[in-house]
Image (cartoon, rainbow, N blue to C red):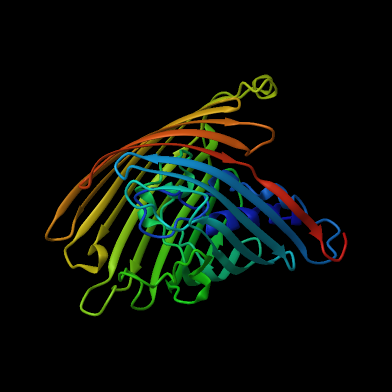
Amino acid sequence: MNLATHSLLVAAMLSWSSGAFAQHSGQAVQRSKANQRAFANLADMFSDFDGWHGPVTNLALQPQISWTRDTLANSNVVTGSLAVTSYTWITPTLTTVIDLSIDQVADPQYGETLVFSGEGFGIDDAYVLWSDQRVGLQAGMFTVPFGFDWGTLPGLFDTTFVSDYQFDNRVGGIASLSTANDGCGIHGLQAGAFCVDGSFMSQTAWTRSGPANDGDPQPGDDGASWFVSYTATEIPLLAPSLSYQFSYISQSAPTSGLTNEKGFSGGFSWTIPLDGSVEATVESEWLSVTPSFEYVNFWDWQGVEGANADYLTPAIAINYGDWEVDFAATWRNSDDGTDASDDVLLSATLTYNFFWPQSQIQFGYAYQDTDDGIDHMIGMQINMPINVISYGLLGR
């Protein structure tokens, strides 16, 4: 493969490994991170390495402004988020990735209104990746690539439940194998070992939170954990757009006396063009529908032997030109041995892309039924990526 193809594979691996981040919810009990789902396609930043003369770096700013009204908590939150993503290609095969963000850290109390208050500044990811065209080695702090709904669902509130298995602030290493697209799609296998980070890297400044192993014990606190994941993308079924993933994870016991938590995830996303002609694309009348589905099951949940939890998430997104509407539902059922819970989330989002690709304004609504009661959430968010620097440090 030439260096241009290699750069695209590396960018895809970066997007795959670092994932994206769930949005703030009034129900959140841990630090929420800047939602980078709208900015996941970064391959075009490094379209080729022709005439390579030295390190190439990219700095992207991804500001967001969002408002959420939560009826159960009787709260209003207006927050500004800023994700700062830095990629540096030290050589065509060696890359450093640092993701920083300013985002909401403090959860509102009942009846409270927060307006640009309670934001914290911290590190989302910081790792080194070595990759040739087939093998990758990654080390540092990252989000474990277990499940993918929290990274692909496009709606404003779609990830409120599935972010439960967004295992971020983990330190360790990942090894990966990947195929080229020879007409049957791109297939990849990842495996890694990790633990919950307890250092300054998972703390935030301004409004303090963390480190990640602070607070109530959680799976992964008491030693090494591991995962294995198989992913396939660009599968040519009707259109080269079918993606699926199967993952298994084992996380160490939260404390002594408990057991390891195990989990399995499987799901797919399939974009089907209904009118993908050149004329439709030029006239901004591209029409497509994207169904997706994910099932996740945990046993010995939270380290309690015999406890279990599962998540069932069907969704559908419809694109027409610059407009998108999506609907998602998540059923979350859990039983810790003493108490069972059946929770439901129904959400809908209307999105309009403006100015340039990946700039969006979103309006969303969610209905949530949990043991705490019935909750209605409405919100708005503006996403505007800004590519600040893309520069060959020693010239090109």
Identify the image quadrant of residue 361: top right
Q: Is residue 244 above or below residue 17?
A: above
Q: Position of residue 293 (x, y in %)?
A: 37, 40
Nearer to the camera, 308 or 52: 308
Residue 90 pos. (x, y %): 74, 68
Residue 37 at what x, y percent from top left?
53, 46
Camera sees residue 184:
no
What quarter of the picture does the C terminus occupy?
bottom right
Residue occupying the point 24% across, 80% down: 256
> x, y (%) of residue 124?
54, 62
User: Image quadrant of residue 249?
Assistant: bottom left
Picture residue at 51% right of the left edge, 42% below the top: 66
**Residue at x 31% of width, y 45% of height:** 73
Q: Which one is in front, 156 or 81?
A: 81
Q: Is residue 291 above or below residue 218?
A: above
Q: Which residue, as the protein is rendered here, is positioned at the far front?
A: 112
Quadrant (top left/top right/bottom left/bottom right) for the N terminus: bottom right
Q: With respect to residue 128, does 187 lie above or below? A: above
Residue 151 lies left or right of residue 304; in this view the side is right
